[in-house]
Amino acid sequence: MRAHLLVRISLPILLILGACHDGKPRGPNVILISIDTLRADHLGCYGYGRATSPNLDRLAREGTLFEQQVSSSSWTLPAHAAIFTGLSDSGHGCTDVDKALEPRFETIAERFQSGGYATAGFFSGPFLHPAFGFGQGFDLYADCTSYGKALDAAKPVDWAKDDATRKASHEDIANPRTFEAFQRWFGARDDKPFFAFVHFWDVHYDFTPPAPFDTRFDPDYTGWVDGKNFFFDERIGPSMAKRDLEHLIALYDGEIAWTDTYLAKIRDELERAGVLDDTVIMITSDHGTEFFEHGWKGHRTTLYDEVIHVPLVIRYPPSIPAGLRVTAQTRSVDLAPTLLDLCGLGELRDVSGTSLLPMLRDPVLRTGSGMRAISELDSVGRSLLSVREQRWKIIGDRLRATARSFDLRSDPGEHRPIEDPASPIVTAGGQALEAAGAELSRFAELHAGASAGSAPPADVKRHLDDLGYTGQDAPPRDGKR
């Protein structure tokens, strides 16, 4: 596919701007915002009790909120590949650190670029590096991390071994750099319609928001938890004191509230430029995070809802109704088809997702069961597949050939797997797993060359364990390591 330009955010950016293509119809501008590690159930517009997201809540009131948005995976790399391509993880094959999104896949950025749009991406986490293929179709793909040179200097399987890179990624504070890079590009753009991808990292651990967000939700705490070294501190485990866990979650909420202020900054930029209502704003996340709901912390270990139920809000007054809430289930693979539909740029070929716009026009569709959601986790040491419907969910372990079914109406927290093999939910779930496996195989064969679920060599796995990205060093249920 098309080549991209990777630059450091300190370099001049005027070179990326070109003239509009004569004769091409002008569609709306598009900003796709991904807030890494953001759980839907920690946002005000999704019913959370704390005021973590006033700016996102405002955008939701001015647009449409999708209540049951499900990610394709529980970690950054495959989830963003699904967002960019509209393909399930088995379809795009970018499922582990030893893989990349291959050039033969058409990404949403490439479709916008070929449609006459200026395209720019701003990423702030290691697994969106262009080494994984995410720069395809971007005129500018700007690295907003503080440690980018370390990533550029070697292959991913090499820098994944580096302790300094691990420490830098967990401690990085990237929101200001990411916004400033976007702001500079936005201020220098020409009059072409644009597609911008903005990735905010800081909701990801470590949870160290700046003042006043560090004390906003728990000002009286005097204990030892400071949000640092979240994944590797052995004191942060299932057996930690309830009061300390409460403060840890308050710091996570502080990161959300701080990141939410950058949504207001982007909105202000659009409004000052007079293009706010001419711009589609889509806000979502790649995955959530666990706080021991099922004995684990972080992500990339399970497919429970705390890591795959993510937000989705779309604002675009000409086409997106204000104040609408879609209760039908939707998926991350639907995002690219929806944006292309909004902009009249045609369909992506042979993908898993579909446009969500018909739901907005048809109350039966938007209040119905929606689309069956398939999520996968095929990273080192794990091979999980879940199928989620509005009423039930089944999680299969492909390595152990086991499955657990849940009634989401009576057990929304997924704590009581159904034991009765004759249960209609167990029967339906088993059939759904079989059908999902067949569908994933079909897409994998259709896009021959994608390789989902393979494990990296043992030395790579060992180093990834050390980095905390495999789930193998997550604390067992007793909190011991």
Image (tube, helix red, strand yellow):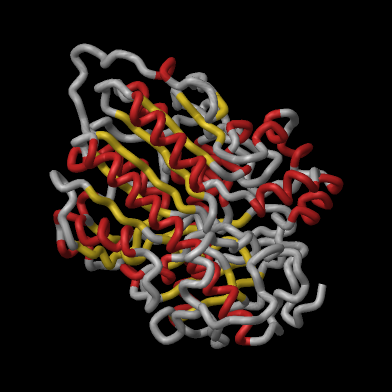
Q: In the rendering, at what x and y percent does residue 47 appear?
A: 34, 75
Q: In the rendering, at what x and y percent does residue 450 appear?
A: 59, 37
Please tell me which residue is depicted at 75% across the width and 53% down the height of the picture. 467
Q: Is residue 292 visible?
A: yes
Please tell me which residue is depicted at 30% across the width and 67% down the height of the picture. 369
Q: Considering only vertical position in the picture, is 291 above or below 459?
A: below
The residue nearer to you, when weighing 424 against 344, is: 344
Q: Considering only vertical position in the picture, is 134 above or below 228?
A: above
Q: In the rendering, at what x and y percent does residue 246 appear?
A: 56, 80
Q: Is residue 434 visible?
A: no
Relative horizontal placement of residue 210, taking residue 16 as reference (left or right): right
- Name the quadrant containing residue 124: top right
Please tell me which residue is depicted at 69% across the width and 35% down the height of the picture. 151
Please tell me which residue is depicted at 18% across the width and 50% down the height of the picture. 320
- Name the quadrant containing residue 344: top left
Q: In the rendering, at what x and y percent does residue 270 appear?
A: 26, 40
Q: Considering only vertical position in the picture, is 200 above or below 304?
A: above
The residue nearer to you, when weighing 146 against 478, is: 146
The residue nearer to you, when weighing 421 against 65, is: 65
The mark total stands at: 0
Relative horizontal placement of residue 123, taking residue 346 as reference (left or right): right
Residue pushed farthest right? 459
Relative horizontal placement of residue 418, taking residue 196 as reference (left or right): right
Q: For the C terminus, which image quadrant? A: bottom right
